[in-house]
Image (cartoon, rainbow, N blue to C red):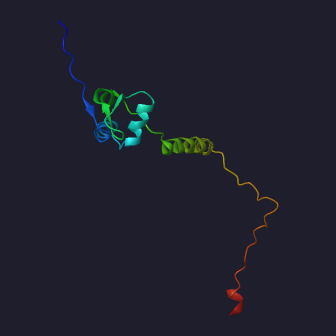
Amino acid sequence: MRKKQPEERWITAREATKILSEKAGRPISPSYVRSLVRLGKVETKELDGRTNVYKASDVENYVVQPRHKRKAIKEEIKQKVESPAKNSQAAGASIEKEPAPWWLPEKTQVEDKSEEVA
């Protein structure tokens, strides 16, 4: 006798996004679930011409990839740029200002003329 296999559970896109959002700790859109189907990560079944359902076990077993952390990358670059300056200051070296380019006018000091009027 053959053992009867348990019937597979199928879920909607809304249920799939809810499961993935809880696992990822951030909102996941239905388009992300559709992308997983295109990549072959999640099995799908068409109910009618418009509605698809997704295999629950595939969705539950999928691990959402972390997002690109632009802010973290910017901070890392900023630290790398600032660290040589901090190291040179710590060593006692002074940071000298570069002279203004030749096409910029020289800064002139404005004399205080309010004393002459009196």
Residue 77 locus on image (x, y percent): 57, 42
| Foreground of the two, 21 or 39 | 39
| Quadrant of residue 23 within the rendered picture | top left
Quadrant of image for the C terminus: bottom right
Task: Kindly indicate the quadrant of the structure image that contains residue 20.
Answer: top left
Q: Is residue 57 left or right of residue 75?
A: left
Camera-side residue of 98 and 60: 60
- Judge left or right: residue 12 versus residue 88: left
Check the image and name the residue furthest to the front: 49
Left/right placement of residue 54 relative to residue 1 reads right
Q: Position of residue 52 (x, y in %)?
A: 34, 36
Viewer-closest of 20 and 44? 44
Whole-percent x and y of residue 32? 41, 39
Q: Looking at the image, which residue sits at the far bottom?
A: 118
Question: Dividing the image into 4 quarters, which one contains the N terminus?
Answer: top left
Residue plotted at (74% across, 54% down): 98
Extreme residue toward the left, this view: 1
Q: Indicate whether 116 appears above or below 55.
A: below
Residue 65 seen in this snapshot: no
Toward the viewer: 96 or 73? 73
* Residue 84, above or below 55: below
Q: Is residue 38 visible?
A: yes
Name the residue at the top extreme: 1
Q: How many marks?
A: 0
On the image, which quarter does residue 47 sit in?
top left
Identify the residue at horizontal 33%, vertical 27% (top origin). Answer: 58
State the residue at coordinates (45%, 39%): 67
